[in-house]
Image (spheres, helix red, strand yellow):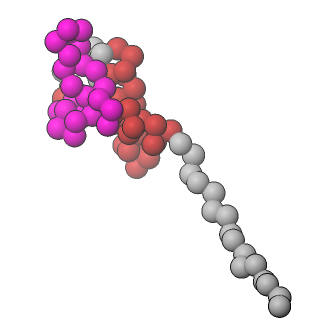
């Protein structure tokens, strides 16, 4: 369940990129309002007057990309033996 709560902001940002907002205008539930306000405060999206919709900022795009990456693999390095 914790994973789903952590994924909500990322899924909301993906909706902003596609639809211009976290949810359609007629949706007024508290969670949507909180997600929208949090994204604005964290500078993940902003209102674009020319387009008349929300757009992702560079920070928002980076946040989506960081979450979509797979965990890194740890590679062990062995000390090279040098014989004289």
Q: Which residue lies furthest to the bottom in this view?
A: 84
Up the image or down, 24 lies above or below 32; here it is above
Q: Which residue lies furthest to the front in this view?
A: 84
Residue at horizontal 34%, vertical 14%?
Answer: 19
Give coordinates of residue 2: x percent, y percent: 40, 49
Camera-side residue of 59 and 26: 59
The answer, for residue 50, to whether it is visible in the render is yes
Camera-side residue of 50 and 67: 50
Give coordinates of residue 43: x percent, y percent: 22, 36
Q: Does the magenta stretch include residue 78?
A: no
Residue at horizontal 31%, vertical 26%?
Answer: 56
Q: Quadrant of residue 51?
A: top left
Q: In this view, does 83 lie to the left or right of 30?
A: right
Bounds of the magenta span? 34-59
The answer, for residue 31, to whether it is visible in the render is no
Residue at horizontal 33%, vertical 22%?
Answer: 16
Give coordinates of residue 31: x percent, y percent: 23, 32
């Amino acid at each position: 369940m914790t994973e789903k709560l952590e994924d909500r902001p990322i899924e909301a940002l993906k909706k902003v990129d596609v639809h211009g907002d976290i949810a359609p205008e007629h949706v007024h539930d508290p969670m949507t309002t909180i997600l929208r306000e949090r994204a604005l405060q964290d500078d993940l999206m902003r209102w674009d007057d020319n387009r008349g919709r929300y757009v992702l900022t560079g920070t928002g795009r980076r946040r989506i990309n960081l979450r979509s990456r797979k965990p890194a693999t740890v590679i062990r390095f062995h000390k090279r033996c040098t014989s004289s």
